[in-house]
Image: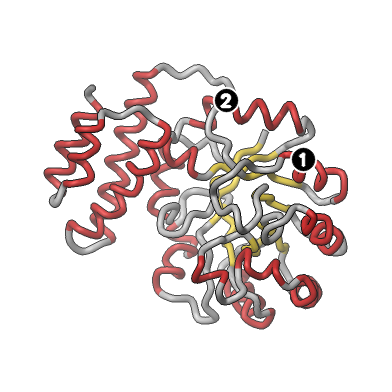
Amino acid sequence: MRFYLAPMEGITTYIYRNAYHKYYGNIDTYYTPFVANRKLKSRELADVLPDNNKATPLVPQILTNKADVFLEITSQLQDMGYGEVNLNLGCPSGTVVAKRRGAGFLEDPVELEKFLDIIYEKSHISISIKTRLGIDALYEWEDLLNIYKRFPIKEMIIHARTLSQGYSGTPSLEAFKMAQDTLTCPLCYNGDITDIASYKKLIATCPDTTAVMLGRGVIANPSLPQILTADNITAEESQDSFRSFHDELLEGYRDYMSGDQPVLFKMKELWTFRSQYVDIDKKTLKKIRKAQSISAYQSAVEEVLTS
């Protein structure tokens, strides 16, 4: 099985990816959070610059519904040495969808098909796609598959939910299996693989699956790929790796950002994910969330890591 790290806006930046790669490294392909501007902003540029990225192979993701913008960004990325880009048709954010981008683009399959016609004809590097199943009904998925099968898609990453589901509800393994029966390009499953039980259910329903993209589950528990592949790791080894990973991530953000508050925001966000899947004492977690300085934060985290 191949494991991919999901592109998560504001979270899986190059600082996060580099630290993860150093201390865990069980990811076959990393994806950047989306870039969306014809002229890359400084943050976007920093995230895709090869010199900043030790976690490879790396595929930049692009968010747009304008073919000329997509091709212009792709050209810049090609000049940096990238041989593949990923088209974001999965983001459910309200601000993104309101502009008919991300998963919002799926609402207009006619325009989507015209867009794909242009970018696949004119792009000089490979294009993979990350998609949802449609807007709010699974019957839309069949129509989308009929569009997708026309194009030489490098790989299709399928978040097996509709836009209206967001990140709630149960992903449709049946829809993923339908894609396996319809498309000839390589496929990757994405959606709520957070533990061995969810992974086994996927394999039992779709035994031909060869790639899985991990998002919230691996942010919560960076050892997840090792756990899913039955690599034996003790609780102590996992805790040691997490401590080293956490400390490097903290220092990376401190070097990149100015002041305690932006750094604390980043680190607290990670604990929000971790607390959903890992049992953490509520009083200690509250201390982490309430910390107003790096020193207070570190003291609270130490309580978790030594408990």
Whole-percent x, y for residue 275 in the image: 35, 36
The vertical placement of 212 against 302, above or below, is: below
> How crowded is the residue under tag 1: few (<14 C-alpha within 10 Å), some, or many (20+)?
few
> How crowded is the residue under tag 2: few (<14 C-alpha within 10 Å), some, or many (20+)?
some
Q: Residue at x 63, y 68 (%)?
A: 104
Q: Residue at x 52, y 58 (%)?
A: 32
| Nearer-the-camera pick, 108 or 86 | 108
Whole-percent x, y for residue 138 in the image: 75, 52
Three-letter amino acid code of the residue under disc 1 = Glu
> Alpha carbon of mark 1 to alpha carbon of mark 2: how far?
19 Å
Three-letter amino acid code of the residue under disc 2 = Ile
Relative to residue 302, is residue 58 drawn left or right? right
Q: Secondary structure at mark 1?
A: helix
Q: Residue at x 29, y 48 (%)?
A: 267
Q: Are marks 1 and 2 in contact (CB under 8 Å)?
A: no
Residue that carries the numbered disc 2 in the rendered image? 196
Residue that carries the numbered disc 1 in the rendered image? 174
Q: Residue at x 39, y 25 (%)?
A: 238
Determine which of the numbered discs, if any, sits on residue 103 in the image.
Answer: none
Whole-percent x, y for residue 307 in the image: 23, 22
Whole-percent x, y for residue 160 in the image: 67, 47
Which coloring applies here?
secondary structure
Q: Secondary structure at mark 2?
A: helix
Looking at the image, tell me whether mark 1 or mark 2 is earlier in sequence order. Answer: 1
The vertical placement of 166 against 102, above or below, is: above
Image quarter of the N terminus: top right
Relative to residue 292, is residue 205 drawn left or right? right
The vertical placement of 136 against 250, above or below, is: below
